[in-house]
């Protein structure tokens, strides 16, 4: 079974802090994604990556950056945390299958981040 | 622009009732994929089904069935004889197809299903 592991289930940080959310997958997937989930808005894509050191902006990248130094690890960085970044953050990965990237995404358990 | 709408925010049923979750999508692509995910209280999204735009056959998996109708841009999900364990948030999602596809998913707002004993 695919396993996507997020480093923390719950995290509390203060405004202005630099925050790192880590995600690791164990299935050698090419694609990795970071979403945030807010009530009434569903999941919104922040950033994604289809290869090591590659990254693409999603729909709401402002205030975030990402890092993918190794294939299995995709990190989300809040450069200077603000209260409006309090949310549930979900990481996902998917297989590329030779460029046809519509394989199902497999999700981690999520990190509930609170910015005080 | 691509968009997914799940108009039902919350649905509450009694165990053993059948329930249908609606999903309407918008896309200009001729090739696309549709997905349903389940998010139980534990938080992890669980993949349920993927459908491509060329396959309009309905699908049944146990108590779950899906009705894909391109004419109305809908991909509805029915649970037959619902059970308490079906209580979760259900998301419908859309992904553009090749060429140039990136695997990005556009999610609907989600429907919270509560099944009461």
Image (spheres, coloured by chain):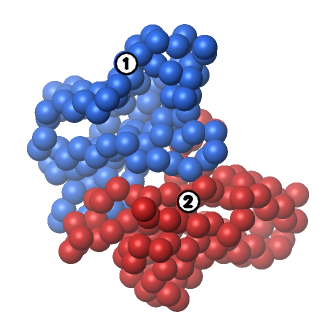
Chain colours: A red, B blue
Q: Label 1 is found on which chain of the structure?
A: B
Tag 1 residue: B80
Regarding residue A77, the answer to whether it shows in the image is yes
Residue at the spot 66% in from the left edge and 52% down from the top edge: A88
Nearest the viewer among B31 and A110 is A110
Image position of B99 with respect to B83: above or below? below
Circle 1 sits in a helix, a strand or a loop, which is it? loop
Nearest the viewer among B80 and B99 is B80
Residue A36 is left or right of residue B50, and the answer is: right
Residue at the spot 44% in from the left edge and 58% down from the top edge: A106
The quarter holding residue B66 reads top left
Where residue A86 appears, as percent x and y from the top left, is: 75, 54
The quarter holding residue B55 reads top left
Q: Check the picture and name the quadrant holding the N terminus of chain A.
A: bottom left
Q: Which mark is residue B97?
A: none
Where residue A114 appears, as percent x and y from the top left, is: 80, 56
Where residue A69 appears, as percent x and y from the top left, is: 52, 89
Regarding residue B107, the answer to whether it shows in the image is no
Residue B52 is left or right of residue A71, and the answer is: left
Nearest the viewer among A60 and B7 is B7
Number of marks present in the image shown: 2
Tag 2 residue: A108
Q: Label 2 is found on which chain of the structure?
A: A
Q: CA distance from mark 2 to mark 1?
A: 28 Å
Image position of A78 with respect to A12: above or below? below
**Label 2 neighbourhood size at 10 Å, few (<14), some (14-19), many (20+)?**
many
The quarter holding residue B19 reads top left
Q: Check the picture and name the quadrant holding the C terminus of chain A.
A: bottom right
Where residue B8 appears, as percent x and y from the top left, is: 49, 23
For the residues bearing labels 2 and 1, Cβ distance under 8 angstroms: no
């Amino acid at each position: 079974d695919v396993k996507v592991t997020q480093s923390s289930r719950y995290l509390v940080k203060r405004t202005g802090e630099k925050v790192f959310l880590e995600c690791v997958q164990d299935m050698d997937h090419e694609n990795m994604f970071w979403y945030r989930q807010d009530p009434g808005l569903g999941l919104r894509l922040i950033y994604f990556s289809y290869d090591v050191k590659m990254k693409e902006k999603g729909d709401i990248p402002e205030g975030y950056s990402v890092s993918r130094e190794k294939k299995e690890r995709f990190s989300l960085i809040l450069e200077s945390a603000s209260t409006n970044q309090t949310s549930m953050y979900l990481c996902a990965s998917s297989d590329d299958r030779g460029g046809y990237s519509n394989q199902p995404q497999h999700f981690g358990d999520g990190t509930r981040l609170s910015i005080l | 622009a691509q968009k997914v709408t799940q108009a039902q925010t919350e649905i509450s049923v009694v165990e053993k009732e059948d329930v249908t979750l609606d999903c309407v999508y918008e896309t200009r692509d001729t090739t696309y994929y549709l997905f349903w995910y389940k998010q139980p209280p534990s938080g992890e999204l669980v993949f349920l089904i993927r459908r491509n735009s060329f396959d309009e056959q309905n699908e049944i998996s146990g108590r779950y069935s899906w009705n894909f109708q391109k004419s109305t841009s809908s991909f509805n999900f029915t649970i037959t004889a619902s059970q308490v364990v079906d209580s979760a948030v259900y998301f419908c999602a859309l992904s553009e197809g090749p060429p140039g596809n990136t695997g990005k998913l556009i999610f609907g707002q989600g429907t919270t299903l509560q099944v009461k004993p």
